[in-house]
Amino acid sequence: MLRLLCVTAHPDDEAGGFGGSLLLARERGIETYVICLTPGQAARNRGGAKSDEELSAMRRKEFAVACEHLHVTRGDVLDYPDSRLDQQSLYQVVGDLTRRIRQLKPQVVMSFGPEGSLTAHPDHSMAGIYATMAFQWAPRSNRFVEQFNEGLKPWRPQKLYYRSADFTIPERQPIALPPVSTRIQIGEQRMERKIEAFKMHTSQAPLFPLFEGNARRHGTDERFHLAASIKPQEVHIEKDLFEGVEDES
């Protein structure tokens, strides 16, 4: 069974950055997993919530509905603090993600790059950094050895991707995006479903016009950068996240 793991920072990232690819993978019979590091309780848009706790609960529910709409096999929201991922214990967060990689056994992992994607959000940057280290450490027998007492074993994912783009948002702070090496054609229907999934995060309704406008303006593909692979290779343009992946149990 092929498995795809997506590591994000906030509820709505799964739809906005990766929704089309998650949908396409499920249609191919690939199991899809999303790990969201925070419940998004520091969001500027509050959806009527009167406290961080209320907003957290609201956004967890929105995440669950959106994941269902994207046919995600399983989505989990962790409890790290929104807008403070850069202040967390690196060893703890990487350990949490390493444990989940060893449990889920994905062949492919995708997240943000260290630039923080188009918005350059620090939480996006840190989600990508934590995911990258977990990708590299999960196969090693000398990392988080206490997890082996839980019955876990090293697991080696085969490919790591960063979300990228071939455009920037002019009104945002400057960023340097990783070069696009992979274009996933998601088509009109999946793009519409991805937009629908994003709009299920109703607490974030003020973001809908900006997101939908950019999604429609830049076509029906999602763009990624191949950041790491267990097979040494030269860069070439891919059309499939699972190109060259071996089906390991």
Image (tube, rainbow, N blue to C red):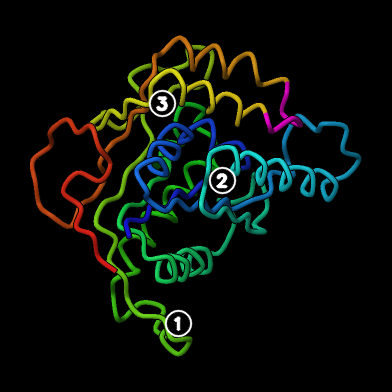
- Which numbered disc, 2 or 1, marks the residue that appears first in the sequence? 2
Query: What residue is at 39 percent from the left and 84 percent from the top?
Result: 145
Q: For residue 147, which numbered disc appears in the image?
A: 1
- Looking at the rendered structure, which numbered label has been put on residue 125? none
Label 1 neighbourhood size at 10 Å, few (<14), some (14-19), many (20+)? some
Q: Which residues are magenta?
A: 200-205
Q: Nearer the viewer, mark 1 or mark 3?
A: 1
Q: Left or right? Give the position of 203 relative to 224.
A: right
The alpha-carbon separation of the residues under discs 3 and 2 comes to 18 Å
Front position in the image: 103 or 41: 103
Residue at mark 3: 175
Q: Residue at x 36, y 54 (%)?
A: 132
Asked if the magenta segment contains residue 201, the reply would be: yes
Q: Secondary structure at mark 1?
A: helix
What x and y, as percent, mark residue 62? 71, 40
Query: Which amino acid type is marked by label 1?
Result: Gln
Residue flagged by tag 2: what amino acid is it? Ala
- What residue does disc 2 label? 9
Secondary structure mainly formed by the magenta segment: helix
* Residue density around tag 2, few if under 14, some if 14–19, many if 20 or more, within 10 Å: many
Q: Residue 40 or 125: which is nearer the viewer?
A: 40
| Quadrant for the C terminus in the image | bottom left
Give the quarter of the image for residue 222.
top left
Compare marks 3 and 2 and give the one earlier in the sequence: 2
Mark 2 → mark 1, Cα distance in angstroms = 24 Å
Marks 2,1: beta carbons within 8 A: no
Q: Are marks 1 and 3 in contact (CB under 8 Å)?
A: no
